[in-house]
């Protein structure tokens, strides 16, 4: 039988401690470099995701504002304004705005509502900056210049044609209607719809105070009926209008303000500034300026502040007017929802756009 060689007492049966420590050191260095690179990749990916999410949210809001601004004034008279209740007994009209700030109101003595209603620095103050509010008025082409068969001081009967009670274009309480007779018109708010009799009612006590027949002397449906030809529905037309308001809202979550798009008031009877729809999250600034066509310098970048709307502002020596606006300059700033781990700072992004108001810049001479 062969002999078996066994290691002697001084022979090594594995790695020495020094070799093990050297190997562990090398492994630690390699893992440190690898994990450091992986951490940088993860932070870079976090940055890309944050920028992409922030930009997508900002673009969604900006696209909606641009789309709506392109339709400002469509379907309105050539004056780019509609009549509202005025004169003896008239109440100020309520205009939607940011939650917690109350209702905006037309000024005493206003006889029309313009297609654009700027509210410079009248939005919430976010990060120390006062934001803007803008309300715009336009016709809804799905319910435009519809014939009437009967009219009274607080209601009209719509001729056969449009479906009043079904589909996305149905008529519902809370919507706004422009009723016209020749060069005269009035803006009213729907309070009730009877699809069987095709009667649309505009009762007093509506949420925006547009229905003031029997209250205000002028600018009402009663006053419109009194125009020649008196009480003649064949001479009248009805069109649905949309009053869209954009503003920032920091009342739901002060850490994540939202850009809100509000259509009309939303409720036919109760005025409620909480009914808007958020279209952009983490919006921290919203500013509007306006390019004016007044035939005397045509100033640009006008804020339409109280000074501009009076004497001594951008249109000095005259006052700027909302009906003179031809372009709107929009600035929307958003920020990432969370601070970046690399710097602990919030990323921000600013989108700007200029919109030419087609319905206010061009006139249909054959209308």
Image: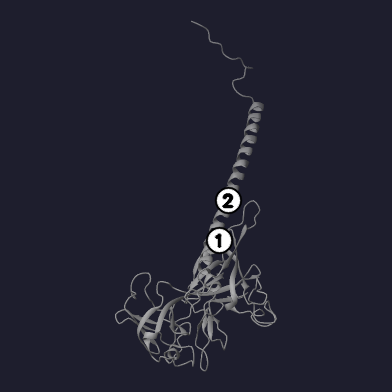
Would residue 98 be visible to someone looking at this image?
Answer: no
Q: In the depicted view, which residue is nearer to us: 122 or 20?
A: 122
Q: Residue at x 57, y 63 (%)?
A: 282
Crowding around mark 2 (Cα neighbors within 10 Å: few <14, some 14 to 19, many 20+) is few
Residue 20 x, y percent position in the rendering: 63, 28
Question: Does dot 1 land on a helix, a strand or a loop?
Answer: helix
Q: In the depicted view, which residue is nearer to us: 41 or 135?
A: 135
Numbered tag placed on residue 58 in the rendering: 1
Residue 39 x, y percent position in the rendering: 60, 44
242 in relation to 83, above or below: above
Side of 22 where 365 appears, left or right: left
Q: In the depicted view, which residue is nearer to us: 293 or 131?
A: 293
Q: Residue at x 51, y 82 (%)?
A: 94
In the image, farthest residue toward the front: 366
Q: Residue at x 52, y 89 (%)?
A: 86
Numbered tag placed on residue 48 in the rendering: 2
In the image, farthest residue toward the left: 196
Crowding around mark 1 (Cα neighbors within 10 Å: few <14, some 14 to 19, many 20+) is many
Residue 114 x, y percent position in the rendering: 54, 79
Circles 2 and 1: CB atoms closer than 8 Å? no
The colour style of the image is one colour
Side of 252 where 298 appears, left or right: right
């Amino acid at each position: 039988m062969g002999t078996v060689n066994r290691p002697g007492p001084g022979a090594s049966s594995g790695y020495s401690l020094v070799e093990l420590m050297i190997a562990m050191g090398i492994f630690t260095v390699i893992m440190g470099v690898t994990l450091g690179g992986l951490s940088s990749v993860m932070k870079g990916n976090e940055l890309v995701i944050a920028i992409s999410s922030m930009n997508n949210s900002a673009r969604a809001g900006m696209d909606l504002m641009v789309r709506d601004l392109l339709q400002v004034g469509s379907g309105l008279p050539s004056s780019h304004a509609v009549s509202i209740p005025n004169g003896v007994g008239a109440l100020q009209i309520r205009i939607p705005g940011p939650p917690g700030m109350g209702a905006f109101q037309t000024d005493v003595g206003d006889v029309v509502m313009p297609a654009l209603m700027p509210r410079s620095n009248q939005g919430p103050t976010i990060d120390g900056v006062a934001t803007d509010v803008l309300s715009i008025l336009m016709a809804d082409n799905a319910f435009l210049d519809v014939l009437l068969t009967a009219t009274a001081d607080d209601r009209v009967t719509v001729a056969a044609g449009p479906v009043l009670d079904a589909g996305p274009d149905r008529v519902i309480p809370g919507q706004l209607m422009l009723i016209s007779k020749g060069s005269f018109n009035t803006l009213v708010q729907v309070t009730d719809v009877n699809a069987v009799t095709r009667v649309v009612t505009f009762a007093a006590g509506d949420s925006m105070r547009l229905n003031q027949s029997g209250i205000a002397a002028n600018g009402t449906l009663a006053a419109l009926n009194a125009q020649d030809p008196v009480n003649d529905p064949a001479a009248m037309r009805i069109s649905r209008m949309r009053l869209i308001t954009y503003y920032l809202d920091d009342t739901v979550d002060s850490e994540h303000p939202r850009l809100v798009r509000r259509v009309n008031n939303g409720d036919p009877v109760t005025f409620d500034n909480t009914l808007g729809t958020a279209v952009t999250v983490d919006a921290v600034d919203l500013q509007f300026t306006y390019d004016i066509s007044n035939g005397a310098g045509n100033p640009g970048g006008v804020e339409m502040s109280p000074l501009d709307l009076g004497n001594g502002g951008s249109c000095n020596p005259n006052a700027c007017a909302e009906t003179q606006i031809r372009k709107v300059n929009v600035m929307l700033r958003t920020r990432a929802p969370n601070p970046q781990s690399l710097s602990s700072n919030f990323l921000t992004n600013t989108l700007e756009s200029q919109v030419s108001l087609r319905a206010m810049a061009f006139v249909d001479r054959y209308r």
